[in-house]
Image: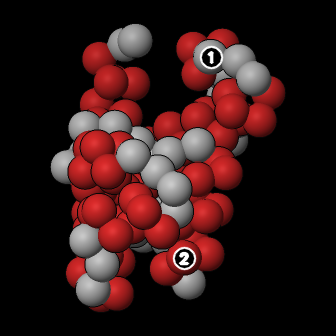
């Protein structure tokens, strides 16, 4: 994995961990309770909240979103009036797209290439 891709994955994991932790706090659930409710490993939940792994595969992500009644991974902010707002989300969005495509196609993320033409 390239250094840039590695940084993007770290940012993706950190962002997801922060969002999951906030959702758990809002709902007042512990890692153990979430793991029990969704039939997951408490170690996986804790690793996600600490940004060590994640985000989870598409099925688990859907289960988490349903459980908390919210989406976790935000889309980039739409650019308005030529501003750069939203550009910081581009690496995150690309990393997420690669992960989701890899899961859907049953291949490694390394086999997914995204080209942007502008």
Residue 19, quarter of the rendered image: bottom left
Taking the spot 29% from the left edge, 62% from the top edge, the residue there is: 32
Looking at the picture, how far across and down is residue 15, in whole percent? 32, 56
The residue under label 2 is: 67
Residue 30 appears left or right of 84: left
Which structural element holds mark 2?
helix
Q: Quadrant of the C terminus?
A: top right
Which structural element holds mark 1?
loop
Q: Quadrant of the N terminus?
A: top left
Residue 86 appears left or right of 98: left
Are circles 2 and 1 on residues that touch, CB within 8 Å? no
Q: Is residue 89 above or below residue 66?
A: above
Looking at the picture, how far across and down is residue 12, in whole percent? 37, 46
Taking the spot 25% from the left edge, 51% from the top edge, the residue there is: 46
The residue under label 1 is: 108
Residue 65, quarter of the rendered image: bottom right
């Amino acid at each position: 994995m390239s250094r840039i891709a590695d940084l993007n994955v770290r940012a993706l994991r950190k962002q997801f961990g922060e969002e999951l932790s906030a959702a758990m706090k809002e709902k007042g659930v512990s890692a153990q309770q979430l793991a029990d409710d969704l039939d997951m490993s408490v170690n996986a939940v804790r690793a996600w909240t600490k940004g060590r792994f994640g985000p989870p595969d598409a099925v688990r992500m859907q289960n988490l979103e349903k459980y908390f009644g919210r989406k976790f991974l935000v889309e980039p902010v739409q650019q308005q009036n030529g501003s750069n707002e939203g550009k910081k989300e581009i690496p995150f969005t690309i990393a997420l797209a690669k992960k989701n495509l890899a899961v859907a196609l049953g291949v490694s993320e390394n086999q997914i290439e995204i080209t942007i033409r502008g």
